[in-house]
Amino acid sequence: MSLVKKLSVFLLLYLSSIQAVAQVYNSSASVAAGGTGRAAVEPGDASFLNPATMAHLGGRFFYTSFAQDEIAAFLSDNTKESTIPAAGAYVQKTTEIENLGELKEHDIAITMAEMFLNKWTVGLSVHYLEQSLPASSFTSYNADLGLLYTPVDSIGLGLVGYNLFGPPSNVPEEIRKKTKVGAGFNYVYRSFARFRADADSEGFIGLGLETFLNRFTVFRFGFSDDFDESQPRASVGAGFSGPRFRLNYAYYGNTQKSSDYRHSIDLIIPF
């Protein structure tokens, strides 16, 4: 336990001292819950929010997600036959960057996770990132390291360090994926509701609530803000979990800027 505490404190202090400007990918489940999910277990989020959650994602999952100018895919295996819980993920997105033009990004991630000590899991995601602008293109490698502690089944605490290798010096500052730290909290109340909270060293904070109408249907609500840039967003969504497939829908909107909004839908197939 002392080793875990030392590692967590070192990671938090070191990464908090480094300015970060880039957000990570969120599935529709985490978007609808205020951009939270570092301590929750969701297919699609394991490779980008907290790789340590991969150790709790039992079975095999194929995940796809669609939003405006963004698509994602995720394939995971955490069965008795697998040597170690692992996943592969891909995100493609297009963003308009002021003074630079259209930015196209392709992020390929390989994730591995494992339980260690008692009630702790650790996970690692390695990323290969391609970024293209009208006048130039860049490639880089990086890694995320995550921890998840579940003292009881209903509570989860997450800590993640992103882009541990630091930003490439040849990439324009406006599109650099800088090093940052994120933390998350997850609490399930009597299989009726789940409360989520996330924060990171960019000044982001998110709060989320999930209410389970029955074993198949869930409604999600959330609020988030980036205090460095004052970007308050409200979100809402719904999910269906059937025996053969799952569907999640999410919508968020900037409460101060009507043009800043997002719809997304995810399809998850366990097999």
Image: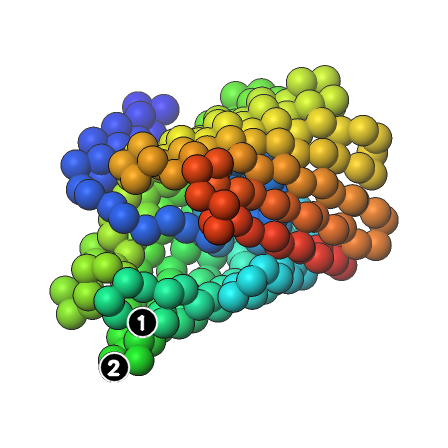
Q: Is residue 60 above or below residue 234?
A: below
Task: Specify the amino acid type for callout 1.
Answer: Gly
From the top left corner, tell me how far across and down residue 3 is, in percent.
Answer: 30, 29
Is residue 40 visible in this depiction of the protein?
no
Residue 122, quarter of the rendered image: top left
Q: Is residue 101 above or below residue 134?
A: above
Q: Are marks 1 and 2 in contact (CB under 8 Å)?
A: yes
Which residue does the image show at 61% across and 45% down from the upper left? 251
For the view shown, which residue lies furthest in the bottom direction? 135
Q: Label for residue 101?
A: 1
Between marks 1 and 2, how big is the CA–CA gap? 9 Å
Q: Earlier in the sequence, mark 1 or mark 2?
A: 1
Locate the N terminus and report the quarter of the image it occupies. top left
From the top left corner, tell me how far across and down residue 106 is, in percent.
Answer: 43, 70
Question: How would you rate the neighbour count of disc 1 (Cα within 10 Å): few for under 14, some for 14-19, many for 20 or more?
Answer: few
Q: Secondary structure at mark 2?
A: loop
From the top left corner, tell me how far across and down residue 132 is, in percent.
Answer: 33, 76
Which residue does the image show at 32% across and 43% down from the upper left? 161
Which residue does the image show at 27% across and 36% down from the upper left? 228
Residue pointed to by mark 2: 135
Mark whose residue sits in front, 1 or 2:
1
Q: Is residue 249 above or below residue 6?
A: below
Task: Specify the amino acid type for callout 2.
Answer: Ala
From the top left corner, tell me how far across and down residue 93 is, in percent.
Answer: 46, 66
Q: Secondary structure at mark 1?
A: strand
